[in-house]
Image (spheres, helix red, strand yellow):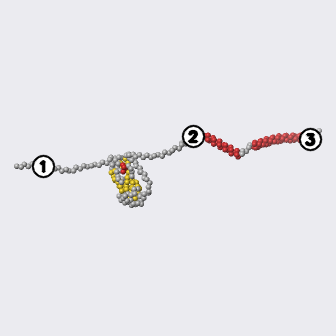
């Protein structure tokens, strides 16, 4: 028989052994769970690595090709959205017709005159400058009114104007001459001097604006300066009143006397 005190010791040891066994069981379960979790983690990691390894890395040429295809697709979509341009027909070249200027001379109440072009020739040494004129441009005169036109011209050239130099009418329309005649210079004009050139004129009989053109011509027949006058004809025609004077007449009375002889 086992003593009582030994039984106490044995029971205490049995309890300790049970406690230890339970602890081992608990630790075994924890270890098993830890091992299972670790195994699962390793499995997931390996699967992820395998998936990463199976994804191919694109080559640079493939990347460039895909980029070009993307740009081309974008351009195609943009072109589709833009309105379609309707082609225009380019006209065929046609021959150019050079217009012919037809000049028709017409007479009206307010004629406009253009200086006729002069043919090119040698340079003329004579030079002139306008100083003044009387009457001035724009002066209003009566139809048919007579007046004296005077231009003051200065010699600004290097030649001396002699009395063979002339003031001549320049246009072809005789109406715009204002009934004036060509005239020679009244004196010799040296460089730097001035001269008064006067002509007697008569205004046109019809109302309107008129311009007459005259030219200075040297002793060689070369024109070297143009001068003009513009007037306005308005109002009634000027009339001339004639006064008739009756000359006294002598009256002779003859008296006949008869004489009778006795």
Q: How far is mark 2 from mark 3, CA to CA?
A: 119 Å
Task: Name the residue at 20% across, 50% down.
Answer: 248
Which numbered circle lies on residue 255?
1
Q: From the image, tell me which residue sits under label 3.
A: 6
Q: Quadrant of residue 165?
A: bottom left
Rendered location of residue 149, percent (x, y): 35, 53
Q: From the image, tell me which residue sits under label 2.
A: 86
Name the element at disc 1.
loop
Instruction: Left or right? Give the position of 230 relative to 3.
Output: left
Q: Quadrant of residue 222?
A: bottom left
Q: Is residue 222 visible?
A: yes
Please tell me how crowded label 2 is: few (under 14), some (14-19), or many (20+) other residues with Cα within 10 Å: few
Q: How far is mark 2 from mark 1, CA to CA?
A: 126 Å
Instruction: Left or right? Give the position of 214 relative to 245.
Output: right
**Location of the N terminus (image quadrant):** top right
On screen, 254 above or below 19? below
Task: Name the residue at 57% across, 40% down.
Answer: 86
Please tell me how crowded label 3 is: few (under 14), some (14-19), or many (20+) other residues with Cα within 10 Å: few
On screen, 204 above or below 84? below
Name the element at disc 2.
loop
């Amino acid at each position: 028989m086992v003593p009582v005190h030994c039984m106490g010791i044995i029971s205490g040891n049995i309890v300790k052994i049970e406690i230890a066994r339970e602890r081992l069981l608990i630790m075994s379960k924890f270890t098993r769970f830890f091992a299972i979790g670790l195994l699962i983690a390793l499995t997931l990691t390996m699967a992820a690595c395998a998936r990463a390894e199976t994804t191919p890395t694109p080559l640079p040429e493939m990347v460039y090709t895909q980029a070009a295809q993307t740009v081309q697709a974008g351009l195609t979509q943009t072109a589709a959205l833009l309105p379609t341009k309707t082609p225009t027909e380019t006209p065929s070249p046609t021959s150019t017709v050079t217009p012919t200027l037809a000049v028709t001379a017409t007479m009206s109440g307010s004629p406009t005159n253009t200086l006729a072009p002069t043919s090119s020739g040698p340079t003329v040494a004579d030079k002139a400058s306008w100083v003044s004129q009387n009457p001035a441009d724009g002066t209003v005169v009566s139809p048919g009114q007579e007046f004296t036109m005077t231009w003051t011209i200065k010699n600004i050239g290097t030649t001396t104007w002699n009395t063979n130099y002339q003031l001549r009418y320049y246009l072809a329309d005789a109406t715009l001459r204002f009934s004036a005649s060509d005239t020679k210079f009244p004196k010799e004009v040296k460089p730097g001097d001035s001269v008064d050139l006067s002509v007697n004129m008569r205004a046109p009989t019809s109302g309107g604006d008129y311009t007459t053109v005259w030219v200075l011509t040297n002793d060689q027949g070369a024109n070297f300066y143009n001068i003009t006058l513009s007037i306005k004809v308005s109002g009634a025609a000027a009339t001339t009143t004639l006064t008739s004077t009756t000359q006294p007449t002598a009256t002779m009375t003859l008296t006949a006397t008869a004489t009778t002889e006795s």
